[in-house]
Amino acid sequence: MSLKAFHVLFITAASALAFGFGLWLLQAYRSPEGATSDLTGGVTALVAGLGLLVYEGFFLKKLKNVSYL
């Protein structure tokens, strides 16, 4: 596996984890015991996941001529 393929796989997994964590925190905020920190963390995690996807797009655009092998 090339460094480019590993990077794409790692960033995809990291963004999926960030989105999952953000949704989990937002669900915790909607519970009766929800705190403002749950809302803040959830929104922050969702923004981080979106930022990782934007970064991955720039990365793929920059290295479009580099092989995955």
Image: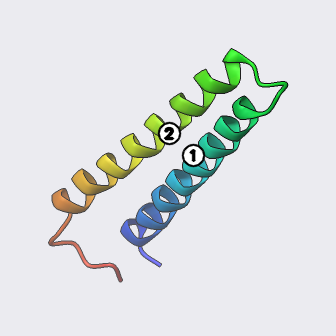
Residue 25 percent coordinates (x, y): 69, 36
Circle 2: is it few (<14), some (14-19), or many (20+) Cα within 10 Å? many
In front here: 64 or 38? 38
Residue 66 placement (x, y as % from top left): 22, 72
- In-image side of 51 versus 46 (left or right): left
> What kind of element bears circle 2?
helix
Please identify the residue farthest to the front as the structure is shown.
32
The mark lying in front, picked from 2 and 1, is 2
Q: Tell me if label 2 and label 1 are in contact, CB under 8 Å.
A: yes
Residue at mark 2: 46
Residue at x-position 55% and y-position 36%: 45
Label 2, label 1: how far apart the Cα atoms are: 6 Å
In the picture of the structure, the residue carrying the numbered disc 1 is 18
Label 1 element class: helix
Q: Position of residue 20 (x, y in %)?
A: 62, 51
Q: Is residue 54 left or right of residue 39?
A: left
Question: What percent of the width, then of the height, locates residue 67?
Answer: 26, 78
Name the residue: 26% across, 56% down. 57
Q: Residue at x 68, y 16 (%)?
A: 36
* Residue type highlighted by circle 1: Ala
For disc 1, the neighbor class at 10 Å (few under 14, some 14 to 19, many from 20) is many
